[in-house]
Image: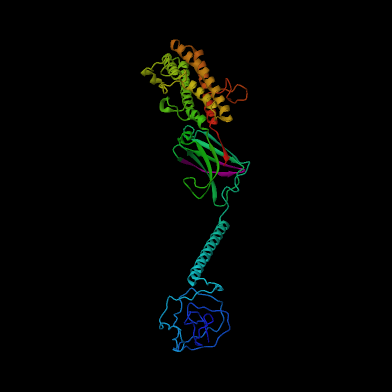
Amino acid sequence: MVCPRCNTPIEEDTVFCGNCGNQVAPLNARGSTVVDTTERLPDRKQSNGQDRSFAPQSLPTEIATSQPWPYAPPPIKADQGNVSSLPPRQDQGNFSPPPLTSATPYPSRPSRGFNIRQAMFIALIIVLLIIGITAGTLALLRINANNSVKKPPATAAPVVASTSGLVSFNDSQNGGHTDALKIIINGLKLPPAGSQYDAWLVNEATEQTLPLGTLTAEGQAFTLNFSGNGTNLLGAGDMIKITQEQGNVSLPTGTVVLTGKFPPLAFIHIRHLLFSFPSTPGKIGLLVGTRETARLLNAEALLLKNAANNGNQAATRCAAQGIVNLAEGRQGAHMQALPGFCSTWNITAVGDGFGLLGNNGYVALAQAHASLAATQPDSTPNIKLHAGHVEICMQNVRGWVTTIDQDAVALLNNPGDMGKVQEIVTLADHALNGVAINGNEIVEPIPGSGGAITGYVHGQLMAALPLASQ
């Protein structure tokens, strides 16, 4: 056997030529191998006893990139002439055969560690998706279950388009001033079983709520009558609420069905008329003061009549002076304190000293604040209508009381003038109660008819509050 490159004779089991180093036989080693697509060779044994057999299958020609297998060439025989001797066998860990130009890369396999991490990541994503889908499904089922159990909202059925309500204010039988109210609601359906409609008076400024009670079905309407036992309701709140409640509640917690709120600007002057005015004695309302002073005036006129009929001129003068004081007030030109002996005939009324007449008396101020309520930007047609009625009544009272005052001053000088006495009695009754002038026996808020009581009632009508659905 000779080397195909340098033609130097070599032994048959030689792998590399000892002369030129050319590879004359394939290697079979772990790690780096040089293989070609030649026919499978039989197993061979080197002289040193190591197994040099090739793998049983043919592989593409390749130089692998793993660690090379150590190579030890066989010894050279003495009869090989000029073939130089090879170094003794030793480990050649760094040896790598020269690459073949015709080598084809063998496809590399992905790392097993990378595949495990990727599989774990994908599994984690799948688990999270399953958890999310499960949670969402359970939440949806829970919502659907709650919706199937919940009752329909309280306001789903009761309020219809034709529902309307009105709150009217009046005095209770206990002598209070605007301390009672009546609520009438039409078009409101019956509440669900176990529920009822409750009414509340709310003060938005102080956040106080006054329970008014439960509405009662009466035919096609719901009604409620409330008495505040002396508490002026216009001073207690500025809004009415109707709510649908279950059981006994002390504050509104249910669905609001109807509400009514006083127009804030006009309501200031309505309160001046019926609740409180800053300059009056006891800060009473202007129409309240007008009516109460007119009552005292009418009672004093009856005492005057009784004294004059008895021919008691001293008592007549006492009654006449009392009438002047009530009409003019403390600032009046003819105001005089009553002599002590007047009490002998129960003539003691002096009023609160504010007076009916004068620019700063009850009548003029009541007329002015009725007009102010009617001319506010938020004034309603109802307020304007009844404010006009109040003004007419106050004008009537002013005229009657002015004549009464003049007659009473005249009686101080001539207590025996029975004509003056009778006129005072008649006009004092008109000033308080008014007079029916149309033959229908009805006192109306028209010129020459309505008095202090009629004006007071129409002041309360100014405060009538409509209720509307939310």
Magenta span? 209-223
Judge whether 295 appears above or below 165 on screen: above
Is residue 286 shown left or right of residue 470? left
Count of numbered marks: 0
Q: Position of residue 62 (x, y in %)?
A: 53, 75
Q: Position of residue 258 (x, y in %)?
A: 56, 41
Magenta segment includes 127: no
Viewer-closest of 135 and 204: 135
Viewer-closest of 176 and 110: 110
What residue is at 46 percent from the left and 89 percent from the top?
Answer: 79
Q: Quadrant of residue 186?
A: top right
Judge whether 381 appears above or below 447 on screen: below
Judge whether 455 appears above or below 19 on screen: above
Residue at far front of view: 82
Give the prevailing secondary structure in the magenta stretch: strand
Q: Position of residue 194 (x, y in %)?
A: 54, 52
Q: Quadrant of residue 347?
A: top left
Residue at far left of view: 340
Q: Position of residue 277 (x, y in %)?
A: 45, 27
Which quarter of the rendering shows the C terminus? top right
Residue at far top of view: 413
What residue is at 52 percent from the left and 85 percent from the top?
Answer: 2
